[in-house]
């Protein structure tokens, strides 16, 4: 996707900024704020979220102008249309994020909840308490609504965060950060609980991911270049939220109408998100009937089809369609565009093997009316979300009922798939006694 992005990384902050001093200050302030946020009761946190929703709705021309500046610059730099779209803070998007803040305010506060308390033979009672992670640093794409989703989840989960949004969204994010800060102040919470890195200089990312004294966990949302940098440099634990090479697999026994509707949605409803389907696998017994129909439907929507030899033979020519042979590299590709790779497979085993080998362990779906096959797919596909008879586009915190999402974790440890409030907390043991001593 980086080929669609603006190459220039111009700093929005003043050139005289001493980055290492600035990042140290941000880190210290976040550490202090994290202590206060962890101890904050639910009431001020909820008041901050409601104030944030209200302030977003009434932000008016200040926010609109900042966003228009980013959108104009992105268009001028030739950013691809789906990428420009995700930059936009339309009134609908502002309403959605404001509603998200209100929904999170209405959710139970996870912090301080004690679970599983059990009396031991020694007399002590042992359980677990849910606590914030502390300070999280988040690096994410040029999508300004994510700034509010991250801020609102940080506030409710009692964490502090340092946010580094995509450079194309810098003006929108600076305006949003001011709104968040005002909402925190209104509720009597530390304004430094949510801080945005005010420069687009990527060196700030380097400083953030190597500062374990300031940051407890790094949450990177992004593509290959970000992955490489994090893997090479991070000294802070990481919860990766990376690319989605998502598959839809059409089984031998399948309701064709259902599968057609779901696959068109999974590929074309939006092409830029990481949960869009990038690869279609079709069981050989369905292929001869299914492929020509789905081929026409997708071609009508402008999707380029890249098939294996058996797929190409069954698709035949489709008027106006872009059809070509898939290369080995296609099976691993996350297009984020109107392109789909297609492969005919001989068995469910082959489908599962293919997904586990070439996929990115993000989200994969089976379209099948065979219960046993659907259950095998759920058990054996090693991805953060596995789905039956529905669209991979549903892999989303809001759709899963989390109120908002930090992102979709492609890691196996701590949090997997859409991450909400619980993913920003951990459990510590609590032990309650009345003077018992160990023998
Ligand atoms: N799993 C998930 O939850 C999500 C995954 N994604 C994935 O992200 C990718 C698309 O988003 P895209 O905007 O292209 O992602 P990028 O990786 O280009 O950008 C994401 C963020 O990482 C920063 N970044 C990228 N490379 C570096 C680097 N070498 N050093 C420092 N910072 C860096 C970017 O900064 P800069 O602005 O300077 O480029 C930006 O802030 C897709 O692969 C998509 O699947 C996207 C959203 C959510
Ligand atoms: N969870 C989100 C997708 C997140 C995502 O991948 O965003 P992006 O890569 O910025 O389009 C959704 O389905 O809306």
Image (tube, helix red, strand yellow):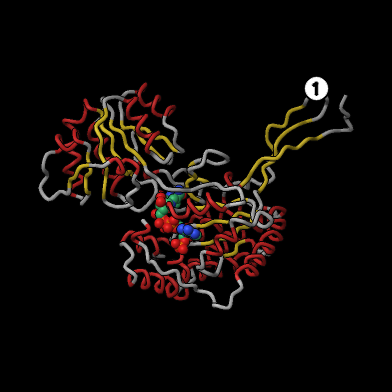
Q: Quadrant of residue 248?
A: top left
Q: Residue at x 56, y 60 (%)?
A: 206
Q: Quadrant of residue 123?
A: top right
Quarter of the image containing the N terminus?
A: bottom left
Q: Quadrant of ligand 1?
A: bottom left
Quarter of the image containing the C terminus?
A: top right
Viewer can see residue 269: yes
| Residue receiving disc 1 | 121
Image: 22 above or below 421: below
Image: 149 above or below 360: below
Mark 1 Cα shell of 10 Å, populated few (<14), some (14-19), many (≥20): few
Element type at mark 1: loop
Q: Residue at x 30, y 50 (%)?
A: 269
Viewer-side residue, 182 vs 87: 87
Viewer-side residue, 245 vs 143: 245
Residue 297 placement, left or right of 148: left
Residue 81 placement, left or right of 221: left
Ligand 1: does it lie within 8 Å of the C-beta at label 1? no
Residue 318, percent across and down? Answer: 12, 44
Q: Residue at x 38, y 60 (%)?
A: 86
Image: 231 above or below 260: below
Residue 389, percent across and down? Answer: 33, 34
Labels in figure, total = 1
Q: Residue furthest front?
A: 232
Residue 41 placement, left or right of 107: right
Viewer-side residue, 341 vs 364: 341
Viewer can see residue 144: no
Residue 357, percent across and down? Answer: 39, 34
Residue 29, percent across and down? Answer: 68, 64
Q: Residue at x 52, y 46 (%)?
A: 419
């Amino acid at each position: 996707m980086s080929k669609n992005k603006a190459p220039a990384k111009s700093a929005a902050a003043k050139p005289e900024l001493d980055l290492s001093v600035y990042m140290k200050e941000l880190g210290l302030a976040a550490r202090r704020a994290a202590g206060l946020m962890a101890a904050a009761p639910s009431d001020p946190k909820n008041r901050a979220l409601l104030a944030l929703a209200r302030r977003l709705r009434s932000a008016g021309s200040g926010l609109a102008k900042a966003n228009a500046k980013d959108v104009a610059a992105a268009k001028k730099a030739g950013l691809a249309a789906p990428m420009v779209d995700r930059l936009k803070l339309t009134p609908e998007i502002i309403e959605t994020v404001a509603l998200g803040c209100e929904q999170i305010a209405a959710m139970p506060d996870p912090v301080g909840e004690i679970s599983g308390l059990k009396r031991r033979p020694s007399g002590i009672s042992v359980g677990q308490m849910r606590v914030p992670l502390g300070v999280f640093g988040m690096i994410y794409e040029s999508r300004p609504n994510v700034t509010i989703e991250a801020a609102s989840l940080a506030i409710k989960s009692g964490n502090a965060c340092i946010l580094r949004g995509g450079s194309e969204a810098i003006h929108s994010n600076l305006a949003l950060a001011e709104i968040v800060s005002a909402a925190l102040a209104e509720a009597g919470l530390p304004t430094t609980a949510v801080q945005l890195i005010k420069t687009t200089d990527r060196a700030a990312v380097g400083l953030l991911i190597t500062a374990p004294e300031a940051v407890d966990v790094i949450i990177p949302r992004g593509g290959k270049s970000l992955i490489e940098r994090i893997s090479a440099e991070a000294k802070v634990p990481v919860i990766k939220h990376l690319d989605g090479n998502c598959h839809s697999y059409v089984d031998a026994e399948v309701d064709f109408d259902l599968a057609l509707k779901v696959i068109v949605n999974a590929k074309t409803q939006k092409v830029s998100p990481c949960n869009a389907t990038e690869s279609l696998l079709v069981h050989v017994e369905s292929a001869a009937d299914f492929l020509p129909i789905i081929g026409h439907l997708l071609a009508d929507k402008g999707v380029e089809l890249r098939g294996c030899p058996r797929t190409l033979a069954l698709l035949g020519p489709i008027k106006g369609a872009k059809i070509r042979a898939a290369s080995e590299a296609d099976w691993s590709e996350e297009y984020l565009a109107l392109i789909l790779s297609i492969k005919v497979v001989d068995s469910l085993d082959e489908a599962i093997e293919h997904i586990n080998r070439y996929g990115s362990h993000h989200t994969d779906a089976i379209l099948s009316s065979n219960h046993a096959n659907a259950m095998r797919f759920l058990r054996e596909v090693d991805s953060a979300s596995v789905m039956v008879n529905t669209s991979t586009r549903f892999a989303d915190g809001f759709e899963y009922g989390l109120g908002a999402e930090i992102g979709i974790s492609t890691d196996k440890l701590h949090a997997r798939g859409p991450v909400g409030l619980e993913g920003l907390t951990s459990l510590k043991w609590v032990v309650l006694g009345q003077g018992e001593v160990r023998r």
